[in-house]
Image (spheres, helix red, strand yellow):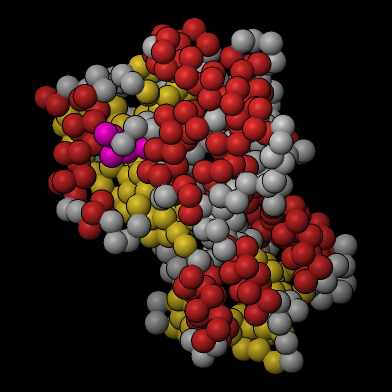
Amino acid sequence: MSKKEKIVVLGAGMGGLSAGYFLARTGKYEVTVIEKAPVVGGLSGSFKHNGFVLDYGAHKIYSVIPNIMDEIADLMGERLLKVTKKNRIFLKGNLLDYPLQIGNLSKALGFQTFLKLGFGYALTFMQGLFDRSPASSYEEYVVKKFGRTTYELVFEPLADKVWGEPSTLHPDMASTRIPASSGLDVILRLLGIKKESAETSAKFFYYPRKGFQDFSDILKEKIQEMGGKVIVNVNPESVQKTDGRINAVNVTVNKESLHFPCDYLISSVPLSDLGQLIFAGQDEEFSKAVKSLQFRHLILVYIFVKKPLVLDDQWIFFPEREFIFSRIFEQKQMNPESGPPDKTAICCDFTCREDSWQWNSKDKVLIDKCMEGLVKGGFILSEDVIDHLVVRFLNFYPRYDLNYKEKIEGVTRKLQQFNNLLLTGRIGMYNYNNVDHCFDMGKFIAENLEKGKMPNEVWRELDHRISNYKIVD
């Protein structure tokens, strides 16, 4: 029996666990996944609070990538619930169905504004007959496809709340997030002439019965059942490297020094952490490139209400700036058993920069602003609130600025000096994606390494693959 090659995976979020699972499943590798935190899952996890099982924001399982949903269904079986999707947009005091319908859209906006949207698109359509140049920013991408009135009403304020000034965002940010191919596409759907497809809107999704943490937990269980290791509370200290290869990872676990030899290293941790491990802060060019990559920080404000349920939706988007949050999410809409029968929890989520007033505000200020918005929108009464909680995460969303491609190419060139290194996951690859994409990355890496492809070749092919990922709400 041939000796198994050793693979160390840095990080046990969804990216790292997925890679570990598919690699262990091949039977060819000795897999060790190491994680700094005391639990696996990262932000694709859950926690308990006063009788509730709460996710870190609104997570769902849905994919249009071939075979990925079959893989997840086989993995989780009866641990999955199938949930009919309902989400809406709150605009001008009205809840608008998503996908949008022409009746409630015209009623909510008023006939005059509705006509302006139509005229705005007509003008854009005519201009597009003569201007075929590619968009240079998120703003230009949306205006070219939908018209300036639609951009200023919905896309600009929501994009500004989530990612910051849209004129400084790369058009990739829009092409990834917006499923419609054009304003005409939207109009045809509004009129019912063109039907929604699985590529543009999910009619249902899947959700782990015990909370999203269960998806991460079962991946950990399966890795261990197949002979792999998943070790938490690990502090990576350094790597050993010779002749363009990383040979081992040195760590401490509970003050004990450990040494993990590796034939391959797969990283899902932040690029700054990986760079510190590999270059020990001695490569100024790499450090400068990594520091220039932009992120948005995430704030979650949980408002607990003495009512069985508050919403009719799983989540609702709020594009208008008068609301601090860009989305609200009700945990019990995923599974009513995730909280006490007479209480519910609304999660208000929003993103910001580290120097923003939101990030630097005290929890009470954020709680008051969220409660104010929920009351103003008619979702709750302030006297019904019984508890609240604020959770913050650094560097949650990669933010594609206008030069992000050049920056990430510079980082990649440095890391690809090592011919047994691969990256995966949202943060590890600096790629804006969802859970199903991380799962697909792990599968792709395992299948191609098993075929005997070199890591740099797999990396190049994976870069191309992830450039075609779409986010489907």
Judge whether 440 appears above or below 111 on screen: below
Magenta span:
322-327
Judge whether 65 appears above or below 38 on screen: above
Q: Residue furthest left?
A: 383
Residue 430 in picture, x, y percent from top left: 57, 60
Residue 244 or 451: which is nearer the viewer?
244
Quadrant of the frame with the C terminus: top right
User: Which residue: 61% across, 74% down?
Assistant: 411
Residue 9 or 151: which is nearer the viewer?
151
Quadrant of the frame with the N terminus: bottom right
Left/right placement of residue 24 relative to residue 252 reads right
Residue 159 inside the magenta-drawn segment: no
Left/right placement of residue 94 relative to residue 263 reads left
Left/right placement of residue 384 relative to residue 237 reads left
User: Which residue: 38% across, 43% down?
Assistant: 161
Residue 305 in picture, x, y percent from top left: 22, 27
Viewer can see residue 292: yes
**Would you identify the image quadrant in which residue 202 lies?**
top right
**Would you identify the image quadrant in which residue 235 lies?**
bottom left
Viewer can see residue 337: no
> Number of labelled discs?
0
Residue 42 in picture, x, y percent from top left: 47, 55
Residue 126 in picture, x, y percent from top left: 66, 27
User: Which residue: 44% across, 38% down?
Assistant: 156
Main secondary structure of the magenta stretch? loop
User: Which residue: 51% across, 90% down?
Assistant: 282
Left/right placement of residue 141 relative to residue 159 reads right
Judge whether 287 appears above or below 437 on screen: below
**Would you identify the image quadrant in which residue 463 lies?**
bottom right
